[in-house]
Amino acid sequence: ETQAEADRNYMKRIEAGDPVAMRQMGWKSKYEGDYSSAFEYLTMAAKLGDAESHNQLSLMYLKGNGVEKDEKMQMYHLEKSAIAGHPYARYNLACYEAINERSDRAVKHLIIAANLGHDKATRA
């Protein structure tokens, strides 16, 4: 299968409302430096509840990739991702809470991240 055929298949799946295809096109666009398209596809997938898309949007807002840096939106997507069961998002929330000296909340997030299988959380 050529890349063009793969892209056509992704577009068919996107038109059918497949959040995984939306996320994959978002990743592809982000990798190619097309942050505008990445943002569009990841936002579509996030609206359908895709945890990894929320996590990627959080990173885009953190770094200002294709969007203005926005801590409020970064945290919104990070929390949505964590609530949806994304172990790295949960671990990153633990780090955020620890930096802000809320150790009780940090510990809770670490425990959840560890239970979700995040390696660093299991050693923290």
Image (cartoon, rainbow, N blue to C red):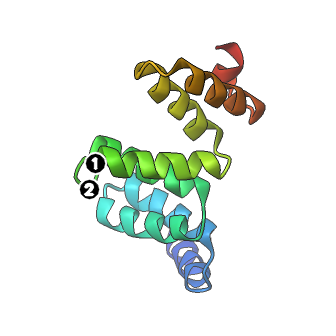
Q: Amino acid at mark 2?
A: Val
Residue 30: give x, y in percent of width and height: 39, 55
Q: Which residue is mark 1?
A: 70
Residue 90 occupies which quadrant of the picture?
top right
Q: Which residue is mark 2?
A: 67
Element type at mark 1:
loop
Q: Quick check: 4 above or below 122?
A: below
Residue 2: give x, y in percent of width and height: 56, 70
Rendered residue at 58%/71% (across/down): 48
Q: Tell me the quarter of the image containing the C terminus.
A: top right
Residue 70: give x, y in percent of width and height: 28, 48
Rendered residue at 58%/84% (across/down): 12
Q: Tell me the quarter of the image containing the N terminus.
A: bottom right
Residue sitting nearer the eye, 112 or 41 = 112
Residue 98: give x, y in percent of width and height: 48, 20
Cα distance between the residues tagged 2 and 1: 8 Å
Rendered residue at 70%/33% (across/down): 112
Mark 1 burial class by Cα count in 10 Å: few <14, some 14-19, many 20+: some
| For the residues bearing labels 2 and 1, Cβ distance under 8 angstroms | yes
Residue 80 circle label: none
Q: Quick check: 40 above or below 121?
A: below
